[in-house]
Image (tube, rainbow, N blue to C red):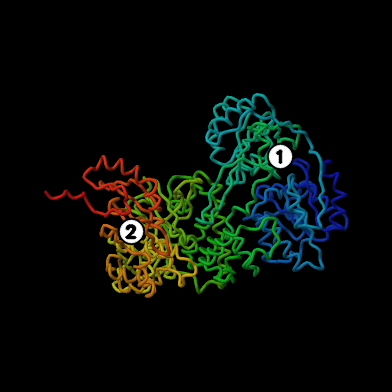
Amino acid sequence: MSKLPVHTILPELFNTLKHQGDAILQAPPGSGKTTAVPLSLLAQPGLIKGKILLLEPRRLAARNVANYMAQQLGEAAGETVGYRIRLESRISPRTRIEVVTEGVLLRLMQDDPSLEAYDLIIFDEFHERSLQSDLGLAMVLYARELFREHQALRLLVMSATLDNQALQAVLPNASLITANGRLYPVEIKYRDTALHPGRMALSVANSLVEILTATSGSVLVFLPGQAEIRAVATAVSAQLRATENCLLMPLFGDLDLETQQQAIAPAPPGQRKLVLATNIAETSLTIEGIRVVVDSGYCREARFDPNTAMTRLHTRRISLASATQRSGRAGRLEPGVCYRLWSASQQAEMPAHLPPDIQQADLASMALLLASWGIQQVDELTWLDPPPKGAWTQAQALLIELEAITPDGQITALGEAMAQLPCHPRLAHLLLRVGGDNNLKVASELAALLAERDPLRSQQTDIETRLDWLQQTPRDNKGIWHRLQQQAKQFRQLRRKLDAAVRQSAITEPLHPGLLLSLAYPDRIAQQRQPGGTEYLMSNGRAIRLQPDDPLCRQRWLAVASTRGQAGQRQDQISLAAPLDIKALATWFPQRIEMQEQIHWDNSGKRIIADRVRQLGALTLDRQRIDNPDPEQVNQALLAQLRNDGLEQLPWTPELRNWQQRVQFLHTHAPTQHQPLWPDMSDAALMATLEDWLLPFLQGQRSFTQLPAKDFKSALQSLLPWAQQSQLESLAPERIVLPSGSRASIDYNESPPVLAAKLQEMFGWHTSPTVGYGTPLKLHLLSPARRPVQITTDLAGFWRQTYAEVKKDLKGRYPKHDWPDDPLTATASRGVKRRPKP
């Protein structure tokens, strides 16, 4: 093996692993750590007694890394170096280095929690922080403490960009080892402005035409996803047709192995490659001949929303760590150049790392695995970042619905069997709840389709079209078709091995695809809002829609497998679904149907109505009116409606409102020495105590209009002790007798209370009248036209200081009325002064 930069730190690494057990290796892209370190460790005498387990984040990388290391030894994969990935294994009794994907590690631990055969586990490219890598590290630490007390299990974490502080917190015995430099230098070039995601394809295509002209060697372009790869390929294909020496190669996870290998292999002599790739090419892979990297600066990530139990794809800017990894692809085989399609100033604003998957992923598989280990609380493990509580709670709720765990978190027999299958718990439940050859065949094909991305990528949402496609060998997409067939076959084989554990609960009668789909997605049964319409409501309460021309719009009920949408959208669009016979669902799975009594307010009739409802989550199957509902529930529904709409629904009269205000005035102004205190009669206080004063008067009623005013009055007055009821009229009278003999109303709605009267009717009163415990009334002194001429609480001061001026003005405007010079000795009157008789 040729000399690589990582070779300079190997002595330090050997010593650290020998004496400390754990190590953290930070080495830049192109330094050779992925392949050189495992082989060098294996060759070091006496250091590695068992096997080395090398974890890679992707299947393509695992396969190619194993093949490369085997070639360095002059062997084929499966001898000293082998690999295990989904649907493929090259392992023999001679194998000492096993290259596996992170998910395979968790499967190995299910068979042997102690990992007894392994001496060292290497987490490669750990900066990607996938859910499985975080979980794998936590589980290895847990298992090592339980099972490897006498036989050390060593750990090595490697990447070009690491959060070393967090890693050293969970690996306190690990030393940080840094390898400086890469094999070849990479020149970094920026552009003036960043790409706009909505115009990415055209901008990248235009840049590529210039870059291809200005450079030599093969070019690797990083794009967010398949859609952008196809769009850029279309945009540049015309220019490439004029350039016979440039081959256009896509590279993403869903491609068949042959196409992926073509993208990785060297270009034919005299030609160059233009590889359009997702971040699958960001780490571990060496794409032969690449000396130019063009980085769009974007990636696509899946984010799980625990509120909707749905996962959405988001396009976002990459991190500094990813930018470093991507640029390093250009310096693996010779000096290179990286064109970053953003500015240097924008580079400084990029985050150091993106949030790890564990903070935004579906945790159902993780929760099932932990339950199978008897771990019910996530804090039993040591995490770099603990799982979010919301996502963990949602995952456990789903496992309960899938019959995998009990409500108290204990794993069931079905859950134990589900944990043995290498797929999401939803798909495991689908496979294990069916019996019979035909059901199992269709269920395994459905599970294979749902475990991969849609092979047809068409606008048709009916998943039955995909099942039909699987029944015949297609002209196109043969690689995907073969992979799905192989996956379905493996599912059937694994399911049959578990037959004894689930035979009693398996359904052997033929089930249509919609019913089978509902086994995986019981929370995504969808009911059409209007016949023939495009909008549906799912049993989890989420609104979704179909395209107007979709044939499934003729279906009243659907079982939904997946949707697509963007953040901020009100509704997602259905992408995969199947028609559902809801009657058959109720027959085969009656435990999903709940019978409820729903007592609620009918706004049109302004009354409480009661129905007996058959419910599937948030969906109503049917309802029947109940004539004699539970009186207690009716009462509570009435009070709830009152709290929602306010006390104005009750039969208030002006007199009752005035009575309420009088009592409230005394409650507010009574001195503390006057016991007992007057009750709080504010609307807020009344609302807070409805059960105490109103509920006894609502018995047998379903609307507020049925409550007679006299009963409502009695209900209010029940809050006032008898002694205070007799005091109310003297302390807070409704009316007061004026010097003129009139009885004037007092308005207690203001503070202090207001008495409005004509000025002539107040002659003879020396001071302002008081109510309560000495509170002067606020007097509105009115002109003969009943317009205020003075507002005061100091009547004596008004007579003394202001009356003379007011009298001059009023005497001129109202000459027929009496305006005495001394109002204190004058006789109060209600109207004009009387003319003397002739």
Label 1 belongs to which residue?
Answer: 324
In the picture shown, does residue 806 fall above or below 733? above
Sequence-wise, the earlier of marks 2 and 1 is: 1
Three-letter residue code for mark 2 = Ile
Image quadrant assignment for residue 281: top right
Quarter of the image where the N terminus is located: top right
Q: Position of residue 562 (x, y in %)?
A: 48, 53
Camera-nearest residue between 164 and 374: 164
Camera-nearest residue between 510 and 830: 830
- Dot 1: few (<14), some (14–19), or many (≥20) neighbours within 10 Å? some
Check if mark 2's residue and mark 1's residue have beta carbons within 8 Å: no
Camera-nearest residue between 169 and 14: 169
Image quadrant assignment for residue 727: bottom left
Which label was assigned to residue 746?
2
Q: Position of residue 17 (x, y in %)?
A: 84, 56
Q: Position of residue 610 (x, y in %)?
A: 33, 68
Left or right: 166 as drawn, with respect to 447 = right
Residue at image location 70% in from the left, 66% down from the top: 112
Three-letter residue code for mark 1 = Thr
Q: Position of residue 98 (x, y in %)?
A: 73, 55
Any part of residue 613 in sight: no
Left or right: 372 as drawn, with respect to 75 = left
Real-space Cα separation, disc 2 to disc 1, in angstroms: 81 Å
Disc 2 versus disc 1: nearer the observer:
2
